[in-house]
Amino acid sequence: MPHIFCVAEKPSIAKAVANHLGGGRVNVRNTTSKYIKNYDFTYRFPRELGGQECSATMSSVAGHTIAHDFEPHLRKWSSCPPSALFESRTVKFVEDDKKPIARNIEAESRRATHLFIWTDCDREGEYIGVEIRDLALAANPRLIVLRAKFSNIERAHVLTAASHPVLIDELQANAVAARIELDLRIGAAFTRFQTLSLQSVQGLENKVLSYGSCQFPTLGFVVERYLRVERFVPENFWGIRVAVEKEGRRVDLRWKRGRLFDRGVCTVLFERMVMGAKKVKVVGLVTKPTKKWKPLPLTTVELQKQGSRFLGLSSQIVMTTAEKLYTSGYISYPRTETDQFDPGIDLRALISKQTPHPTWGTYAQSLLAPTNPTKFHAPRNGKNNDKAHPPIHPVSLVLPHALASATERRVYEFVVRRFLACCSDDAKGETTTVDVVYGPPMAPPHEMFGTSGLVVRERNYLEVYVYDRWSTAELPTFVLGEELDAVEAEITEGRTAPPGYLTEPELIGLMDVNGIGTDATMAEHIAKVVERQYVFARPRGRRAAVPGEEEEEEYVPPAGDDGDGPNDGARPARGRGSRGGRGSRGGRGGGAARGGGAGTGGVQEFVPSTLGIALVEGYDNIPGLDTSLTKPFLRKEMEVKLKGICEGRLRKEEVVQESLDMYRQVFAIANREVGRLKEACRKYLT
């Protein structure tokens, strides 16, 4: 009789899947790893897995089991020139703390006929699946290997995944293998180069200067904005303010020219306007319907950006919390680029699960009410579909007392409210735009002014999505052609203000559009530059209001509680997104908070340290370096090539060689001009 050996990526997933497949009748066995348990049960698997009621064992790994490093004699920093690491031989091995896990896989594989892999359905998950497969096949070459395709651990979804096994995606696994090798070689070479070359600079004698091909462009974005702020030269500007009184209310009118940077010209226009004129005349009056569009379905990047903006949490804490909600079976897989729901998904069934909730249950009921069939509206479709996972959405009802922390409650609430908003109608209203002229009646040109008002007619999605603002600002009744007395007309003066320091939502947006990391790893790279003390995170400061400028109103989150990343060459690596610990990805968990306060308490902004500025300026000042290491172009090109591997257009070997050649050239130039790097560091650090 067939015996199916199932392996998940995390212990929590193994436990949940085993209980679903075993119908609650599961025998639990301990292993030599204190984190890993084996679950024995019976289940009727599909034809590909035996096609009959058979015995099964569900176990798990804890992220990556296989480590990658250089051969032992090259691991000492004095063993070879850093440049040799671009081509030195690397080896794979099981680290000591993972050996009990590897032994469990080997032992269980020997008595199995089939290996059924339940790792996360993303690139990293495919590669971890390959690690598991290779360990299992070494112990039992006769195994038939398949994998489950799933995006949440809700019971019905797990049963469906068990009934439709697929093959491991070798292309995605190859892309991860390429990235791991590149990150190891490039990170180690540049980390040793920087650290050893700059030891002569005061303050850096014993400091490891870690380099990562994603971390340095991230640092570059922060430094670039910081320098824009520090080098900003304010300018005076002038404008004209006019106000009228209508129905007992004062109405301020906006000058159509906005503002001028020449006081003399503004004064001439003002004096000509008021000369002999006492009234303003309404020359334009338009009332038309308008909408505030509901949000798109939730992606990983949006979850991180909006979690920072609306919840006051760092992206690292948002992702750690979302991962926990996923492994608990509360939300779908939180690492997805997809912003469109598949037509086959039963959105109404997902909504119905939320109807008992004490806070938003009534709204969920209204979306399904037969007396109001137009309340429910299909979600908007975005432009992205990764063909792997749906947008992030709730898969089960969780009452507030069932969640362990305020952070979990707030992230879960955001995911649910976003989903319900997606299934609602746009907010609808009417805008009224009034145009007036002020000036000598017989001597045009007149100066044009205007104002506008809004009446919200139907709040719709805004009823549940409390994070958006759209409120009525009603105007008095104006009549086309009427003339009104100007109760105020004066010249105003202001000064331009610098941009703010880079906030976390802005940084994530820059990383996204420039291809730095993936949606699943951006938070890790941000945490890493904070941990390395290249950048400091702090709550965003509020600058004084500047005339003529409006600051966007933001949702103020309620008080709550709070929550490391890929290796970049400072020590042996598994690569970006490497996973470790109890089923979590390496680096997911609190680096931001440790490294500079990037936790809760409002939107975070980033300010570079003097060391961060020095490294960026040093590399940017190197002549002949067409593409600085602090710019996104090198890494972006690598990411494009990795995607080419996933799509079958490029081979792993050619991508690795081309990318190494590219970085090797940059390394040679940086090594030749290392004096520029030293000069910048001495400038800022001594």
Image: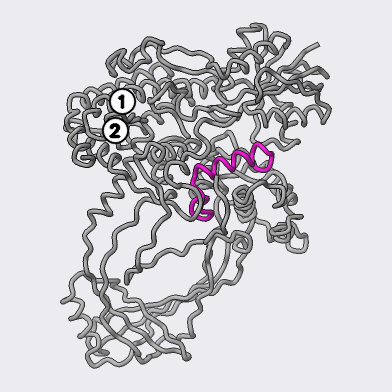
Residue topped by disc 1: 190
Looking at the image, tell me whether mark 2 or mark 1 is earlier in sequence order.
Answer: 1
Query: Which quadrant would the C terminus be assigned to in this image?
Result: top left
In the image, is residue 67 above or below residue 321?
Answer: above
Magenta region includes residue 646? no
Write the residue at 30% across / 86% down. Answer: 489
The x and y percentages for residue 257 are 28, 72
Instruction: Identify residue type, mark 1.
Output: Phe
Q: Is residue 534 left or right of residue 668?
A: right
Decide which of 330, 50 is in the foreground and name it. 330
In the structure shown, which secondary structural element does the residue marked by tag 2 occupy? loop
**Can residue 378 be seen by looking at this rendering?**
no
The x and y percentages for residue 15 are 72, 29
Q: Quadrant of residue 391?
A: top right
Instruction: Identify residue type, mark 2.
Output: Leu
The magenta region covers 307-332
**Can residue 600 be seen by looking at this rendering?**
yes
The x and y percentages for residue 37 are 71, 23
Count of residue discs: 2
Residue topped by disc 2: 629
Dominant SS type (magenta): helix
Graded by Cα atoms within 10 Å as few (under 14), some (14 to 19) or many (20 or more), the crowding at tag 2 reads many
Q: CA distance from mark 2 to mark 1?
A: 10 Å
Magenta region includes residue 323? yes
Are discs 2 and 1 less than 8 Å apart at CB? yes
Closer mark to the observer between disc 2 and disc 1: 1
Decide which of 389, 587 is in the foreground and name it. 587
In the image, is residue 392 above or below residue 236?
Answer: above
The x and y percentages for residue 196 are 27, 24
Write the residue at 18% across / 24% down. Answer: 672
Write the residue at 22% across / 90% down. Answer: 275
In the structure shown, which secondary structural element does the residue marked by tag 1 occupy? helix
